[in-house]
Amino acid sequence: MSQVTEFNEYRQRMNATIMAADNKVIKRFFNLDTNTYAAGALDVKTKEMLGLACSMVLRCDDCIKYHVGKCFEEKLTDEEIYEVFAISNIIGGSIVIPHFRRAVEYWEILKSEAGSGAHDGAALAAHKAEHDGQPHA
Amino acid sequence: MSQVTEFNEYRQRMNATIMAADNKVIKRFFNLDTNTYAAGALDVKTKEMLGLACSMVLRCDDCIKYHVGKCFEEKLTDEEIYEVFAISNIIGGSIVIPHFRRAVEYWEILKSEAGSGAHDGAALAAHKAEHDGQPHA
Amino acid sequence: MSQVTEFNEYRQRMNATIMAADNKVIKRFFNLDTNTYAAGALDVKTKEMLGLACSMVLRCDDCIKYHVGKCFEEKLTDEEIYEVFAISNIIGGSIVIPHFRRAVEYWEILKSEAGSGAHDGAALAAHKAEHDGQPHA
Amino acid sequence: MSQVTEFNEYRQRMNATIMAADNKVIKRFFNLDTNTYAAGALDVKTKEMLGLACSMVLRCDDCIKYHVGKCFEEKLTDEEIYEVFAISNIIGGSIVIPHFRRAVEYWEILKSEAGSGAHDGAALAAHKAEHDGQPHA
Amino acid sequence: MSQVTEFNEYRQRMNATIMAADNKVIKRFFNLDTNTYAAGALDVKTKEMLGLACSMVLRCDDCIKYHVGKCFEEKLTDEEIYEVFAISNIIGGSIVIPHFRRAVEYWEILKSEAGSGAHDGAALAAHKAEHDGQPHA
Amino acid sequence: MSQVTEFNEYRQRMNATIMAADNKVIKRFFNLDTNTYAAGALDVKTKEMLGLACSMVLRCDDCIKYHVGKCFEEKLTDEEIYEVFAISNIIGGSIVIPHFRRAVEYWEILKSEAGSGAHDGAALAAHKAEHDGQPHA
């Protein structure tokens, strides 16, 4: 099982357990979290870059993976995502570097699963299907 | 070997290595750490919830596991521990969510090892025996 | 103007400015934040101690003041609040100490404004009135 | 002296002291920091929003002020900056709120110094002149 | 009153209030904190540089002031303390810069109070007297 | 494959991928990071202890491993490295303990791979060869 699939399946299984516990504050927070990234005055691509940069400086590997996945869906180029990585490294410092390495590893996996580095339709659709309606982090 | 056993064995083995190094500041700090959670003006259950919430917002998976285990020993209900989780998520933000998922996973394992979701005596005793006289984090 | 009044007035003025901007995610988050501390499986006193401990280890002076104020309303004794402080210092380390000093300063002001160290009715009512219906942090 | 002027003057005075110490690593880091926000695959506006969001979740008031000032120069609308604020609050949690209040206070001062809420030329030019060629944080 | 005197007086007054509360965990922690920096396998100068670097990356202004003061007592040169600052900025990132500025400001005040940039005996003795037997942070 | 080899190989492979992306800010930052630890007014041993302490309080396991490896090369004794660990635990609090355990585990592996606890030439040379010319974190 690929790192991408494993990550998504774990998230979905645990989110289901959490939802079943039926704590109102948590349910509303998860729902709010999803809405935060919807298009508004800023488009989804910009919001996902913001989510990625924040996740990098706060050094949360799973949050980074999630937003790297979303940036992939939003068709960021290598040049663009590396500029997000650069800002995150400069603001957060060298302590961010190990998380940066894992972010790059995940980005490369997404590209290679999509086939020859391009964002081909099938892989993207599969990726998208796994994420829809899920809290983001 | 279950996640619970593995976690406890690693902690105990490394704590033993650390104690053997005989650094006075560290020994006193580990000892002080244990005393911090003893019953006083606040009872152990309250103190362990405080320890869990702090571990969640500081996002330390091992510390979270430790205090989830202690909260299990203190017989917190699902409703209670989810309110601790809710406060931690709201204060710490969505960056806490991946740690929250792992906390829930560990909580579910503890319940299932204790048999049918109940806090039965044998599992609890086994869990308790593994922890006694150990620094908390 | 006392530190307590100044703190509350600034919070209220800026919260009003924020609400006027009418960003839906922020309004829902502020509302959710308030609900998080309502009595549930855990009582308000326990939840406010959790809020205080988390604010201490995350080292946010304003959040600490807010929850110290709430703990004062919930009539925590000196012994109880110092046990919350102790857990926060041990978990968060000596880096927490300067925030701990300011927390103690604020606690002493609250007690002295309430008259002779007791939680007298008038001061408490004034304090409560300033806070009601306000997001917590 | 306005909060904006005071902030800028202090930064410039201390940066000059730091540069005079002539530590090569620090000089290169300050220079690199400035280059990070130059237009590239991403435009300056996007990069400044990334800088602001990261500063919010890391809760650094001075860094927030700096990037709020830059976002003002880049002519962000209220709606846009509040979406950056919203993402920062959701990711970073309620612990971010006190910093968010101060960010809003600074944003309002910038708007009012620029005259009637509009981004008029004179105020903007003055603001810009104070910042040019300065490390960002 | 100079920033140095004000800082020391506040620390001493609040530490006295804290000690009076007589919480055993806190008293032991403050005592342990003091012992941590005593000469051992590493000398005091090295330990204070470690304390300063940690305080910088954790971004606690009061802790930074305290250790800058101690590094001054230990007669660090400008070149040495700027190398500590450089490591802290690189590891912690640009988010550290505003704290770095305040550290430099405090360092300059200490030097100027000691007279013409040199570590003269009287100022140093005064500084030392204010600190002795105090928890560090 | 030992934990040491695995760690070094992953770092080298991902660093190569990162360098290939050819983002100027990142390349300069990685280069600057390496230069930061070169001998200057402070020697390499002191700088590596600073790097280790900062990595401990910021709780980055990979950064800790890296600097533990460097401290091993610099021939720190057990007593010395445990004093660095002690300062890090006291400043950073009990939340550091799980990272401290993994640091000790890695330190023990380095000693045992070097043969009977001594810093023998062959193991050290092998370790050094793996690290040279690599960004530090």
Image (cartoon, coloured by chain):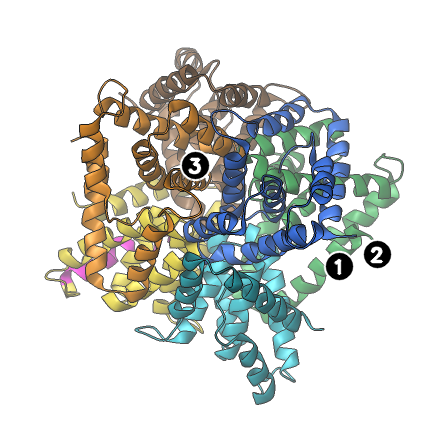
Chain colours: A brown, B orange, C blue, D green, E cyan, F yellow
Q: Which residue is mark 1?
A: D9
The amino acid pointed to by label 3 is Cys
Q: Which residue is mark 3?
A: A60
The question of residue B132 being in magenta is answered with: no
The boundaries of the magenta stretch are F122-137
The amino acid pointed to by label 1 is Glu
Foreground residue among E116 and E28: E28
User: Marks 1 and 3: which is nearer the front?
Assistant: 3
Horizontal arrangement in the rendering, residue B46 relative to residue A47 (left or right): left
Foreground residue among D78 and B18: B18
Snapshot quadrant of residue D112:
top right
Horizontal arrangement in the rendering, residue B131 relative to residue F34 (left or right): left
The question of residue F130 being in magenta is answered with: yes
Q: Disc 3 sits on a residue from what chain? A: A
The amino acid pointed to by label 2 is Met
Q: Secondary structure at mark 3?
A: loop
Task: Confirm whether residue B120 shows in the render.
Answer: yes
If the image is split into quadrants, where does the N terminus of chain E sit?
A: bottom right
Q: Is residue A136 above or below residue F93?
A: above
